[in-house]
């Protein structure tokens, strides 16, 4: 008895690995979202995840081999962690994902890129800005709620108008499109829900990022403001992360 998490790539059968094909064919039961159901006509739905996980467990207990199809590669932002937490050790059949596809289309490597996901996850604007500021390449998985328009608006808000954005839409699927431009150029473009973006920063910051803001960065009236040296010391003690939420009570500015 076993459960195997199969990387189904973008859904194009031509991009399935040989191992993925064998696992899909040999499994006693296959679970897949509607997007991948055509890869095995008798596939069971994954859309109601709690119900699907319960049935996967029952089939596994009966000694059946169960394949769970996930988009892209199981090792990157997939259902694999959920399966491992629920069932323990899970076999993996790797796949070709949107990240590999976009970088292949661009003819460039991605081993030094910062990889983030806003796909069903709460990616903070500050965390995105920090990543782009400190990396030459940042790859961001997007969805319908936080798509390329959100990404470009976030980059502009973070003072990163000089960054170059490349959006891969519907990669290896009908309607594939690669769009290039500055954040201001792409902010009002129309994109579908299946997108991945590569953000290129030609001038990433070297070393540690600066701590604190200069006095002239604040909107100030006549109210006295804490000295910058004190603010920097407070930040050093707080050790905030890019996704931290900080409340400044009585800031006076």
Image: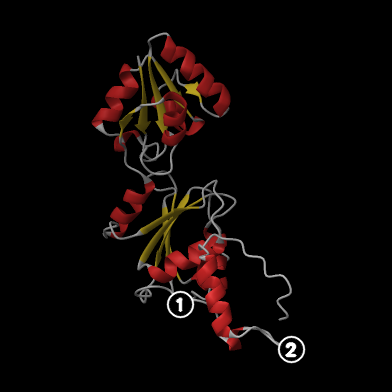
* Residue that carries the numbered disc 1 in the rendered image: 210
Residue beneath the point at 31% across and 17% down: 26
Specify which label sits upstream in the sequence, 1 or 2: 1
Where on the picture, by quarter, is residue 205? bottom left
Residue beneath the point at 43% across and 39% down: 78
Residue beneath the point at 43% across and 71% down: 133
Q: Residue furthest left?
A: 18
* Residue 251 percent coordinates (x, y): 70, 76
Query: Disc 1 versus disc 2: distance between alpha carbons?
Result: 25 Å
Query: Do residues under tags 1 and 2 come within 8 Å of each other at their CB atoms?
Result: no
* Residue 253 percent coordinates (x, y): 71, 81
User: How many circles with numbers are drawn on the protein?
Assistant: 2
What label sits on residue 242 in the rendered view? none
Neighbours of disc 2 within 10 Å: few (<14), some (14-19), many (20+)? few
* Residue 87 percent coordinates (x, y): 43, 24
Where on the picture, by quarter, is residue 9? top left
What label sits on residue 221 in the rendered view? 2
Q: For numbered disc 2, what is the local secondary structure?
A: loop
């Amino acid at each position: 008895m076993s459960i195997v998490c199969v990387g189904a790539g973008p859904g194009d059968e031509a991009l399935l690995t040989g191992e993925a094909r064998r696992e899909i064919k040999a499994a006693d039961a296959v679970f897949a979202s509607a997007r991948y159901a055509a890869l095995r006509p008798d596939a069971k739905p994954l859309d109601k995840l709690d119900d699907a996980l319960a049935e996967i467990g029952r089939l596994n207990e009966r000694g059946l081999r169960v394949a769970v199809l996930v988009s892209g590669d199981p090792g990157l932002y997939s259902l694999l962690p959920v399966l491992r937490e629920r069932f323990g050790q899970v076999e993996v059949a790797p796949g070709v994902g949107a990240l590999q596809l976009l970088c292949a289309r661009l003819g460039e490597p991605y081993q030094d890129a910062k990889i983030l996901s806003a796909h069903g996850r709460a990616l903070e604007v500050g965390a995105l800005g920090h990543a782009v500021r400190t990396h030459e390449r940042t790859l961001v998985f997007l969805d319908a709620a936080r798509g390329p328009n959100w990404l470009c608006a976030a980059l502009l808000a973070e003072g990163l108008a000089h960054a170059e954005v490349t959006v891969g839409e519907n990669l290896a699927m009908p309607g594939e499109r690669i769009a290039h431009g500055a954040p201001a150029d792409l902010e009002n473009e129309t994109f579908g829900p299946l997108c991945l973006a590569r953000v290129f920063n030609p001038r990433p910051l070297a070393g540690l990022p600066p701590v604190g803001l200069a006095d002239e960065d604040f909107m100030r009236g006549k109210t006295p403001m804490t000295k910058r040296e004190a603010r920097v010391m407070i930040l050093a003690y707080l050790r905030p992360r890019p996704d931290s939420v900080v409340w400044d009570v009585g800031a006076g500015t």
